[in-house]
Amino acid sequence: MIVRILTKFTYITLSLSLLLSGCNKTKDIKAAVVSARKEASDIGITILNKGGSAFDAMIATDLALTVCFPNAGNISGGGFLVYRTASGEVGSLDYREKAPLNAYEKMYLDENGDVIPEKSTLGGLAVGVPGTVAGLAEIHSKFGTLSWEDLVKPAIDLAMNGYIVTEKQERSFRNKKDDFIKINGENTFYAQDFKAGDTVKNIALAETLKRISKYGAKGFYEGPVAESLIKRVREAGGIITHEDLIKYKPVWRKPLNFKYKNLNIYSMGPPSSGGVCLGQILKMIEPYNIGQYYHNSEKAIQLIVEAERRSYSDRSKHLGDPDFNKIPYNQIISNKYLNNRMKSFSFDLASQSKDIQAGKISWTESEETTHYSILDQKGNAISVTTTLNGSYGSKVFVEDGGYFLNNEMDDFSIKPGFANMFGLIGSEANSIKPEKRMLSSMTPTIVMKDNNLYMILGTPGGSTIITSVLQTILNVYEFGMDIQSAINAPRFHHQWLPEKIEFENGVFDEVSMKKLQEKGYDIKQDYTRVIGRVDAILISKNGIITTGADPRGDDKASHLYH
Ligand code: DON
């Protein structure tokens, strides 16, 4: 395949990749775990080394992230698993949070129908009914090979012995300290000034994990852990009840499946928009053979942006919890429908989103989710994205439990046309109803090529998740990059509204930027947030396994060798 990368980026992507790849390129890798933290990836590998499967490693990795990556790793949020077993069985588990039974459509509006600032993001009312522990227990009962206690133990040990604060983490704690105090008071655990290099021991969390170890999901949804969770939510102004916790059930769903050229892609279907939008965007650009253009050149950017514009507008209208909405699956990712959507596209001029209802856009909240990819020595593949939504969720900290609660309720459309923290606008399909799941963008994905396992990938990033997964797949498949370079490469994002293309800062070619502006595109290069943090595994045609961990975070790949 011809590699077409603009010279400036060749330097950036290759030099970064040389720095970072180190030991990640070897013929000898037989299994890998790539996650947001070295501790969690190492724990996953330890489980594989003990003879556990990718599913076992998933449970241990997930719980380890709860300890050492408290901004997103969680027992009190939710997530999605997409898997493919070595024998070719494919499936997905939805353990997304739900709206509490006492939730109602206008719960974040005042008497004039205006949105009350921060109600859906900060404090107890922002908390959705957590799904993570029920999800992990469900995965264990279907696929676990090691004992549940053995899988929880490494996280208990990590909480007892402590994890080391990284520099990025020190910044993250510092940035959120005022909110921690505002919601939880001066003496809250994470109001301490943890510095890079410090060891954080979270004994309260170790105790919570011990109950989960002993009693499984019931250790979280019933008994003293449930009691203290509900007490804390109530104190912080929330409405979750024991009945909410007891009723929570994860759901096995058919993954969203579509083809792009000779790739067969499995991703998460609703209540995530990830799979549908990834499918729509890839299928809209497929007829244009994007690999003929230079990577991140004006034309390649235009194609992706215009497909994204169309897809995100569909997202806002048609997608929501499939248990509450009829989703037009067949139509929405059909070639006929998508070719028709692209009829108005031209390389000459930007399309306009302005004739479609606009919302108030805010980008103020920093955000956090986490993704990990696992491949075990037998060939089982796991792709998991999990979240508290915002960084440290609602900031409500259950002091005697050692963990933060999510603020996933903000992913609902809290008022038609009002943008959530990711600037996303929704409609009735994603309105709040008791026990409904809020629409997500999480896109845990598994890609097959010519019937062989090819990529396992995903990322955090709110609304930018979809584009980050998309660009990583294209960077490898269309632009011939190795997996680490594909992850390192600069990203951009468009989501229909706001009308802007958001570029990672300072790394895009000025000539292309100028040409795009001349065609009517609104360019925004001064966002400080990162667009995705992709963790991925690539398997070549001859079975060579390579891994890529995103340098935008502290992400790390750990391996098992032959
Ligand atoms: O489900 C969603 O789409 C969001 N709650 C994800 C949040 C997220 O990715 C934040 N991370 N950077």
Image: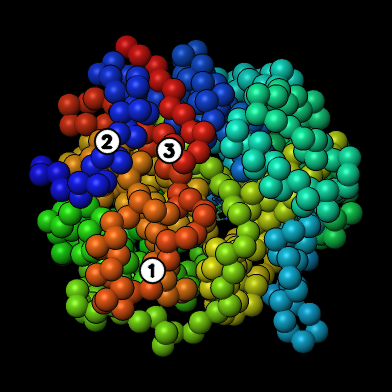
The amino acid on which the numbered mark 1 sits, given as a three-letter code, is Ile
Element at label 3: loop
Element at label 2: helix
Residue 410 image offset from top left, x and y in percent: 64, 63
Q: Quadrant of residue 141?
A: top right
Question: Which residue, given by chain and number where applicable, does mark 1 sit on?
Answer: 523
Q: Which mark is residue 550?
A: 3
Q: Earlier in the sequence, mark 1 or mark 3?
A: 1
Task: Say if residue 38 shows up in the picture.
Answer: yes
Q: Residues within 10 Å of mark 2 (few under 14, many from 20)?
A: some
- The one of 421 and 385 positioned closer to us in this rendering: 421
Q: Is residue 422 left or right of residue 171?
A: left
Question: Which residue, given by chain and number where applicable, does mark 2 sit on?
Answer: 14
C-alpha distance separating marks 1 and 3: 25 Å
Q: Quadrant of the N terminus?
A: top left
Q: Are marks 1 and 3 in contact (CB under 8 Å)?
A: no
How many callouts does the rendering have? 3
Q: Residue at x 49, y 59 (%)?
A: 527
Q: Earlier in the sequence, mark 3 or mark 2?
A: 2
